[in-house]
Amino acid sequence: FFFSSRRRHTRCADVTGVQTCALPIYLDYLNISSSKKLLYFFYLLNGLDIPLSVEWLFEEGDEDMKEVGRDYEYMINIPFSFVEKKKI
């Protein structure tokens, strides 16, 4: 699975004296098994009690993947931002 503890995948910024981390997520495809693991990963992050946000990236016109991100946002207590990327 694509999870790793590589810090290069997160961007942290000092916002009003509080360390806030943004975790970018960019997926082409997500099956049921991976979806469950991703949800479990989000639950683990939510339990860390650190200021965190998710940048959910999706290809231009891929409304299905955007909707998947909205579903995760609804299920967990982490703020999401949605970024539409141009197709390569």
Image (cartoon, rainbow, N blue to C red):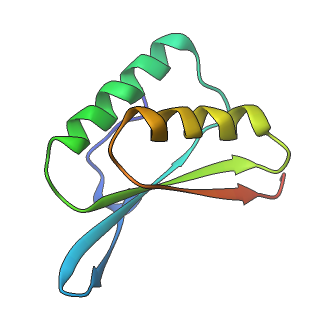
Question: As displayed, is residue 20 above or below residue 47?
Answer: below
Q: Position of residue 19 (x, y in %)?
A: 21, 74
| Residue shown at the point (60%, 32%) measured from the top left | 68
Q: Is residue 59 above or below residue 53?
A: above
Q: What residue sits 30% from the left and 25% below the top?
A: 40
The quarter of the picture where residue 50 lies is bottom left
Which residue ends up furthest to the bottom in the rendered image?
16
Please, which residue is most extreme toward the top here? 33
Number of numbered discs visible in the structure rendering:
0
**Which residue is nearer to you in this view: 36 or 80?**
80
Residue 69 placement: quadrant: top right
Q: Position of residue 78 (x, y in %)?
A: 35, 49
Q: Which corner quadrant holds the N terminus?
A: top left
On screen, residue 13 versus residue 38, left or right, reads: left
Residue at horizontal 30 percent and vertical 52 percent from the top: 6
Left or right side of 43 for 59: right
Q: Is residue 66 left or right of residue 25?
A: right
The answer to which image quadrant residue 29 occupies is top right
> Could you say where residue 58 lies in the image, as x and y percent from the top left?
69, 47
In the image, is 85 to the left or to the right of 55?
right
Question: Which percent across, then down, holds residue 53?
Answer: 38, 58
